[in-house]
Amino acid sequence: MSKTYFTSEHEWIDVEGEIGTVGITDYAQHALGDVVFVELPALGKTVAKGTETAVVESVKAASEVFSPASGEIVATNDAIVSQPGLVNEACESTAWFFKLRLSNPAELNGLMDRPAYEDFVKGLE
Amino acid sequence: MAETSRGLMLEEPLIFEQDSPGLCGVDLPEPPLVIDRLGGLERQEAIGLPGLSEPAVVRHYTRLSQKNVGIDSVFYPLGSCTMKHNPRINEKLARLPGLADIHPFQPASTVQGALELIDLTAHWLKTLTGMPAIAMSPAAGAHGEFCGLMTIRAALEDRREKRLRILVPESAHGTNPASAAACGFTVDPIPATARGRVDLAAMKAKLGGDVAGLMLTNPNTCGLFEDEILEIAEAVHQAGGYFYCDGANYNAIVGRVRVADLGVDVMHINLHKTFSTPHGGGGPGAGPTVLSAALAPFAPLPAVVHDDRGFRLVEHAAQSGAKPCGRLKGYHGQFGVFVRALAYMMSMGADGLRQASSDAVLSANYLLAELASELTPSFAGPCMHEALFDDRFLKDTGVTTLDFAKAMIDEGFHPMTMYFPLVVHGALLMEPTETESKDTLDRFIASLRGLARRAKGGAAASFKAAPVHTPRRRLDETAAARTPVLRWRR
């Protein structure tokens, strides 16, 4: 049974065992508009929580994707590099960005669950 | 305006698509018998140039030039770009043969006047900013940023300190983080406050022994003066860092604020913005970078020096007696731009420059005040040289900032900067500059008010269709970015 957490920077991380799958939220893709470019981290790279790990660029702006947790990159979703438009279509499912082997799962405790994130987004509007 | 002047919207194919093989503008006789010394290396195939008559070529390039929209044809309120009029006296002087027809490799004794001109331009830039040193060679704003960061890095290396973090506020220019990253620094963003300025407490919390410096844009990209700049400078210095000021918005404060008095260590100056030389496709920029005493020894080479033998260029570190960070450019900078900038400074005079910055601020405040009834200003005024609005006035209209900008084209204006700065939603950033008349501003205000009322009145469909009065309608920017066609193929 996986559990999904959200950051105030509009990333989600879906955690199953020691692996976390990271993507951007629907609010983020909507704010960005048509996504035209995605840059993903190298496999095997170690990232710290809150560091710039991927880049997503739309017709309006370029934006960093911060890793919601620390760990090692074990997979990247190359489909969204060749077809950036997938991020607009399915950012919270098949258009995930990267998978991490978590080095410090306790970090997840500071993140929001879905209801808390939805309240957070409502506060932004 | 656009309603009455839209005739002759001429379609213009690429010159290669107008090829009539064999046609040529000139009719040359066959060359007399020449001895070929190429030894078998002669071209075997046709060179591939299109065949056209001379009038067809002239019309082609004239039509292309007519499609160009610039400060010489329309009001161009692009924020953070200072699209002011370029006085033609600057152009006249830059074309003087003694200034235009010289070469960087000429012996210094034959170009004493040109070297003196560089020195004089440097002198006035140092005088205006109150800074003791200047690097003249950077070729544009971002190159000036690069220059400043290189001197900071050289200074830190000289101190034998490893400081790799640069703080960059959200209200800074977009190029700042890129320049810092290009110099090998990591970028640490600082949030803005509800007043659109640097969050001083957040900034102080990020200071530490690994911070190389802070890059601040003042006035910032919200068009606001960073009024806590003295405290910011002091905190950065206390932490052992250097204070970079992005001078892209210098036009707002020329003659009113001496940059040195703000505690700045280094600032680039966009001659092509503040000092009225052409830019935006119209010619090279120049980004001379003023330096504090602490950073002066690390200025890049070459430098113009003056001694009893006249003016000369110092090209090598051994001659300079300092610790230059290196070299940024083949020669000594954009000489033609220096000529124009100096012509501007000398024709304006100190009082004229001061008047220009005051008028630029007045123009922006006029826009801010007159548009506040229909658009939504992001921050309470007064502003500096640019007025920032967000898209709250378009809420629930179905019209976006992009649509609004496209509709402005049909009104006969170049759109403002949009979606930047990122600190406000759907930003519309307008910089009128001092060179626009009140009549132009009034026409612009009336147009924008009309557009805003139309948007609120449910005319979203007409906005989505804009622009209508242009050679091309709305371009598919998404497809252009996702699958760009970068090469023409026959």
Image (cartoon, coloured by chain):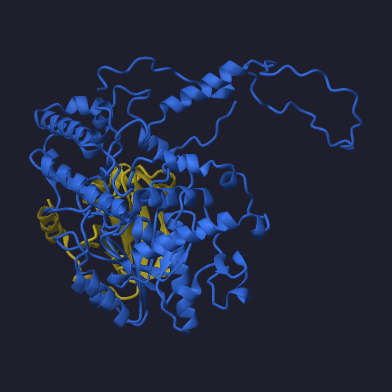
Chain colours: A yellow, B blue
| On screen, residue B470 above or below B390 | above
Percent x, y of residue B347: 38, 48
Q: Residue at x 28, y 66 (%)?
A: A68
Q: Residue at x 42, y 38 (%)?
A: B88
B130 lies left or right of B4: right
- Quadrant of the image containing the C terminus of chain B: top right
- Quadrant of the image containing the N terminus of chain B: top left
Residue lying farthest to the bottom in this orientation? B160
Percent x, y of residue B239: 31, 81
Percent x, y of residue B313: 60, 64
Nearer-the-camera pick, B78 or B206: B78
Q: Residue at x 14, y 26 (%)?
A: B459
Residue lying farthest to the front in this orientation? B308
Q: Using the rendered view, name the quadrant where residue B109 is placed.
A: bottom right
| On screen, residue B88 above or below B202 | above
Residue A26 appears in the rendering: no
B331 lies left or right of A39: right
Percent x, y of residue B337: 48, 49
How many numbered badges does the structure rendering display? 0
| On screen, residue B394 above or below B236 | above
Residue B237 appears in the rendering: yes
Nearer-the-camera pick, B310 or A35: B310
Nearer-the-camera pick, B11 or B281: B281
Nearer-the-camera pick, A101 or B300: B300
